[in-house]
Every structure is written in C-alpha cells, then in structure tokens.
Image (cartoon, rainbow, N blue to C red):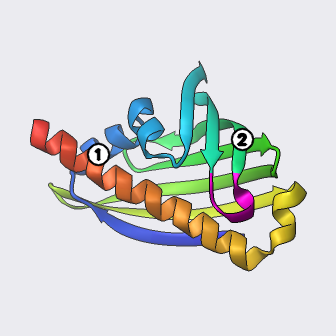
Amino acid sequence: MNGQGTLKLEAGIEEAWEVLLDPSVLERCIMGCKKLELQSENKYDAELSIGIAAVKGKYESTIEIADIEKPKHYKLIVKGEGGPGNVEATGFIDLSPIDENTTELAYTYEADVGGKVAMIGQRMLGGVAKLIIQDFFKKLAKELKRIESNA
C-alpha cells in the first residue's frame, strides 16, 4: 500500500522541522500513541492503540527517524506487531519553504501489513492509512498554532 500528499504548514521551515522531530509533539500527534520512549538516538519504542475497523488493537512498535537532512528531509520507519497483525511502513518527509512563515510538507509512504489485518483488503487498509495520516497532520497543525500563540 502506497500513498502521498502535500500540505502547507503555518510555520517557517526551521520551526516546522523542530516540531516534526519533537518526541512530545509526535506522541501527541500519532493516533493512539500511549507511550513514546527514546531507545537510542532517533529511535523510539512506542505503544499504539488503534481503534479502527479490523486494524483495531494494540501494537508494540518502533519508530525510527533516518536519512536526516536538516531542515529539509527525513525518513520515518515504523514497525509494529500486535494481536491484529504486523505492519512495516516507511515514510519520506520533505519540507520546502514557501515564505518565511509558511512551509510545504510533501510526504510519501509505503506500508506492508501481515497477519489478520492483511485479510481485510487493500482498499479498506488504504482508507485506514489515509485516515491515520490525515489525523496526524491535523494534530500537527494544531501543535504549530499552539506553539505560535505561546511564542
């Protein structure tokens, strides 16, 4: 399953970069994230509890940030296992300045699933993946606004 998209962030590229890599922001923005603990540099153990369709369940996961090119690019690697099955996903995040207060974020992702989850079909999984990603970016935009209003 693959996907891509773009969105505008109401922040300069440096600020957007810092927020995207802040573990406390990631924990608040990742759907169902109950725990995000640093394991090693740029690698986290996570506990995710997702309640959508057949994907519903708890997943013990690792989230790794790799191929970092500050402040423009990184790769996000997510591996998770739980009762419903397993997932391995890789996302690529690219930031481009539009002006000093606005940044375009472009993303692409690839995900493979196994176990019971894989039996529900690609169409449903694609919809669930899109929902999870849209939720993440909606929460990220709120975090950026909250940070701006506190500055």
The answer for how far apart the CA atoms under marks 1 and 2 are is 25 Å
Q: Is residue 117 visible?
A: yes
- For label 1, the residue is 143
Looking at the image, is 76 positioned above or below residue 1? above
Q: Is residue 42 visible?
A: no
Residue in the picture at 62% in, 62% down: 109
Q: Is residue 87 left or right of residue 133?
A: right
Q: Find residue 64 and report its image quarter.
A: top right
Q: Find residue 44 and report its image quarter.
A: top right
Residue in the picture at 56% in, 23% down: 37
Looking at the image, is 142 positioned above or below residue 68? below
Magenta stretch holds residue 53: yes
Q: Quadrant of the N terminus?
A: bottom right
Within-10-Å neighbours for mark 1: few <14, some 14–19, many 20+:
some
Residue in the picture at 63% in, 43% down: 49
State the extent of the magenta-drawn residues as a range.
51-56
